Image (spheres, rainbow, N blue to C red):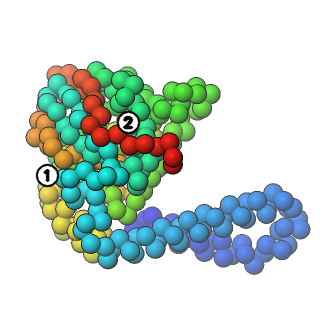
């Protein structure tokens, strides 16, 4: 609900500014015009997203790609090989293009090879993607290609009303909004979360999915970009490992490689 509150607050601020535009334009000149245009674009984007949310609340379950184990034409598929077994994941490039392109490119280039699961919390999630192995590192493909880019900035969050942190979902880990680099997590929680959700804010088909577990408290703050379609037993096995005080497994668990089963062409996007 906080997301919607802040959107509403931003809209109210824009309405307040509108009445003073002619005065401010005379005083501040072109700089104000540019900032005013940016604010209008932001408001339009917020309004468009709210319409998407309203549509999603009424949408049929078939429109939520995580709820199907089949891989659609506009989706990608990978197999993540780990020292505990294989995890098959489908990815959603149409809904989270930056995160998927980043993940696929890193996978193809071997960036994730031999990277450990450095943070594991049973009945919550398992996290990996950091070459440092301690949660302090990892960059996006854009930083890797151009080191002049500030790695601390990362790439923006891609929040969709059709993607959620249900059990088995793959999402980008971050240190705050729009700081995505290379780290990711898989939601592992098995506890029924449906009672905490309202059909006024969450689609019924997603509420039903949360009966199988997941972490709805993470929705809106992290980019969900994939879903495990085979190998949740491996995810559960990793999550059950004994850990130290930093939630790092006492026994090293690594990604040995990621195979691209079905790719996606970003060249015409």
Residue 66 location in percent, x, y? 25, 56
Q: Is residue 247 in view from this perspective?
A: no
Q: 90 and 267: which one is in front?
A: 267
Residue under numbered circle 1: 190
Residue 213 location in percent, x, y? 17, 55
Q: Quadrant of residue 220?
A: bottom left
Q: Is residue 65 in view from this perspective?
A: yes
| Residue at position x 40%, y 70% in the image | 53
Secondary structure category for the residue under label 2: helix
Q: Quadrant of residue 109?
A: top left
* Residue lying at the far right of the rendered structure: 26
Instruction: Say if 154 sits above or below 62 in the image.
Output: above
Q: Residues within 10 Å of mark 1 (few under 14, many from 20)?
A: some
Q: 148 and 66: which one is in front?
A: 66
| Residue at position x 55%, y 39% in the image | 153
**The label number, if any, that marks residue 104 in the structure image:** 2
Q: Earlier in the sequence, mark 1 or mark 2?
A: 2
Q: 21 and 77: which one is in front?
A: 77
**The label number, if any, that marks residue 54 in the structure image:** none
Label 1 or label 2, whichever lies nearer to me, is 2
Q: CA distance from mark 1 to mark 2?
A: 28 Å
Instruction: Say if 36 sits above or below 131 in the image.
Output: below
Q: Quadrant of residue 137?
A: top left
| Residue at position x 51%, y 39% in the image | 154
| Residue at position x 78%, y 75% in the image | 20
Residue 209 location in percent, x, y? 19, 62
> Left of 127 or right of it: where is 195?
left
In what quadrant of the picture does the N terminus appear? bottom left
């Amino acid at each position: 609900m906080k997301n919607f509150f802040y959107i509403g607050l931003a809209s109210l601020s824009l309405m307040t500014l509108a009445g003073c535009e002619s005065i401010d334009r005379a005083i501040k000149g072109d700089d104000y015009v540019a900032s005013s245009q940016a604010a209008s674009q932001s408001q339009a984007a917020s309004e468009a997203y709210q319409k998407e949310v309203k549509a999603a609340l009424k949408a049929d379950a078939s429109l939520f790609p995580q709820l199907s184990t089949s891989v659609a034409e506009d989706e990608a598929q990978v197999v993540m090989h780990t020292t505990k077994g294989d995890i098959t994941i489908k990815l959603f490039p149409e809904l989270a293009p930056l995160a998927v392109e980043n993940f696929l490119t890193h996978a193809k280039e071997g960036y994730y090879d031999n990277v450990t699961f450095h943070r594991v919390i049973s009945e919550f999630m398992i996290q990996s993607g950091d070459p440092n192995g301690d949660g302090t590192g990892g960059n996006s493909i854009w930083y890797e290609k151009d080191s002049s880019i500030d790695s601390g900035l990362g790439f923006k969050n891609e929040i969709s009303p059709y993607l959620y942190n249900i059990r088995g979902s793959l999402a980008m880990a971050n240190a705050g909004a729009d700081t995505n680099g290379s780290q990711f997590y898989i939601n592992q929680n098995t506890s029924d979360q449906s009672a905490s959700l309202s059909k006024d804010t969450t689609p019924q088909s997603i509420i039903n999915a949360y009966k199988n577990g997941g972490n709805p408290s993470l929705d809106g703050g992290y980019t969900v970009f994939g879903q495990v379609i085979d190998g949740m037993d491996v995810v559960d096995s990793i999550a059950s490992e004994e850990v130290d005080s930093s939630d790092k497994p006492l026994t090293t668990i690594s990604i040995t490689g990621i195979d691209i089963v079905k790719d996606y062409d970003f060249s015409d996007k």
